[in-house]
Image: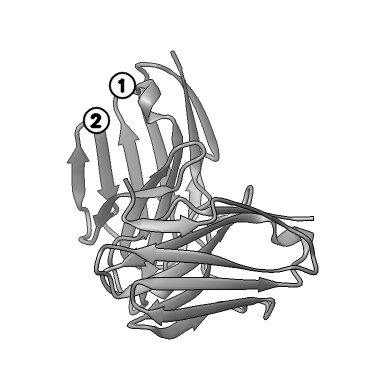
């Protein structure tokens, strides 16, 4: 079935280093959403990207949607210990409903102080 | 703080037990979802309700039975579960069942013994 590949699975960084997680699909996506799940918590919506080549920023977080709408990335500048958690991308294919929202396996970020 | 409340937070049940998970959303949303989160697997969509009507059932075994009496409440009835059903069960809601951000509850950590 349709899959959304997310890499890397784990990332360990020193506080202050940058971090990037990537999400890739073999088919064109209608939109992509990003979520963050803190340890022991639940996924929390961060942002949604809809347009080809779209770039959105939230403080130290930069989200990009590829020109072909088949990939996306989340970049964190100068990580802090509060950034610890698992970051998920979730995507909908063209013509799909929210019931067809496909989640990646997530990238688990740990930050060493 | 989440506008989606799930109870109980933790549940341990035997394979012959019958139990129910409850979810309530206070956000005025029209769509509600059940997701299963297991270790090292992507979030798995189980059921979708849009305006109280079930619109998705992703080949979930019949030992899981959803109920949506109104757009604010969602239940997941459990009976004769298997140990492999142990997981975090997350309820979510969204404004509509298409391209809207998901708001997750804190989840029920289920252990089947």
**In the image, are marks 1 and 2 on the same chain?**
yes
Occupied quadrant, residue B13: bottom right
Mark 1 or mark 2, earlier in chain:
2
Circle on res. A60: 2
Q: Indicate the secondary structure of the residue bearing disc 2.
A: loop
In this picture, is B99 found above or below B69? above
Q: Is residue A94 above or below residue A71?
A: below
Q: Nearer the viewer, residue B11 or A56?
A: B11
**Residue at image x 77%, y 65%?**
B82
Count every numbered label the image shows and give the total.
Answer: 2
Q: Position of residue B62 (x, y in %)?
A: 67, 81
Q: Chain of mark 2?
A: A
**Residue density around tag 1, few if under 14, some if 14–19, many if 20 or more, within 10 Å:** some
Q: Position of residue B75 (x, y in %)?
A: 50, 72
Name the quarter where the N terminus of chain B is drawn.
top left
Residue at image position (50%, 36%) is A39
Determine the residue positioned at 26% across, 56% down. Answer: A48
The residue shown at (76%, 72%) is B80
- Mark 1 touching mark 2, by CB under 8 A? yes
**Which of B73/A45 is in front?**
B73
Quarter of the view holding residue B4: bottom left
Image coordinates of residue B14 in percent, x first then y, are 78, 61
Q: Mark 1 sits on what residue?
A: A78
The label shown at residue B64 is none
Residue B37, horizontal then vertical, whole percent:
57, 55
Q: Is residue A9 left or right of residue A17?
A: right
Is there any visible trace of residue A95 in the rendered image?
yes
Report in which chain the residue with disc 1 lies. Answer: A
In the image, taking residue B111 as reference, residue A40 lies left or right, namely: left
Secondary element type, mark 1 = loop
Alpha carbon separation for disc pair 1 and 2: 7 Å
Q: Residues within 10 Å of mark 2 (few under 14, many from 20)?
A: few
């Amino acid at each position: 079935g349709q899959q959304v590949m997310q890499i890397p699975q784990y990332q360990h960084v020193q506080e202050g280093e940058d971090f990037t997680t990537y999400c890739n699909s073999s088919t064109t996506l209608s939109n992509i959403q990003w979520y963050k799940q803190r340890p022991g918590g639940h996924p929390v919506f961060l942002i949604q990207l809809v347009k080809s080549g779209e770039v959105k920023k939230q403080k130290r977080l930069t989200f990009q949607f590829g020109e072909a709408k088949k990939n996306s990335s989340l970049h964190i500048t100068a990580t802090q210990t509060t950034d610890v958690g698992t970051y998920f991308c979730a995507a909908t294919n063209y013509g799909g409903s929210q019931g067809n929202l496909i989640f990646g396996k997530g990238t688990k970020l740990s930050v060493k102080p | 703080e989440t506008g989606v409340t799930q109870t109980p937070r933790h549940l341990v049940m035997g394979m012959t037990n019958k139990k129910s998970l409850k979810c309530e959303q206070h956000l005025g949303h029209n769509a509600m979802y059940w997701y299963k989160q297991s270790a090292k697997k992507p979030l798995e969509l189980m059921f979708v309700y849009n305006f109280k009507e079930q619109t998705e059932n992703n080949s979930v075994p019949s030992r899981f039975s959803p109920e949506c009496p109104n757009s604010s409440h969602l239940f997941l009835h459990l009976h004769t579960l298997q140990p492999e059903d142990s997981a975090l069960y997350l309820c979510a809601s969204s404004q509509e069942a298409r391209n809207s951000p998901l708001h997750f509850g804190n989840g029920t950590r289920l252990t089947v013994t």
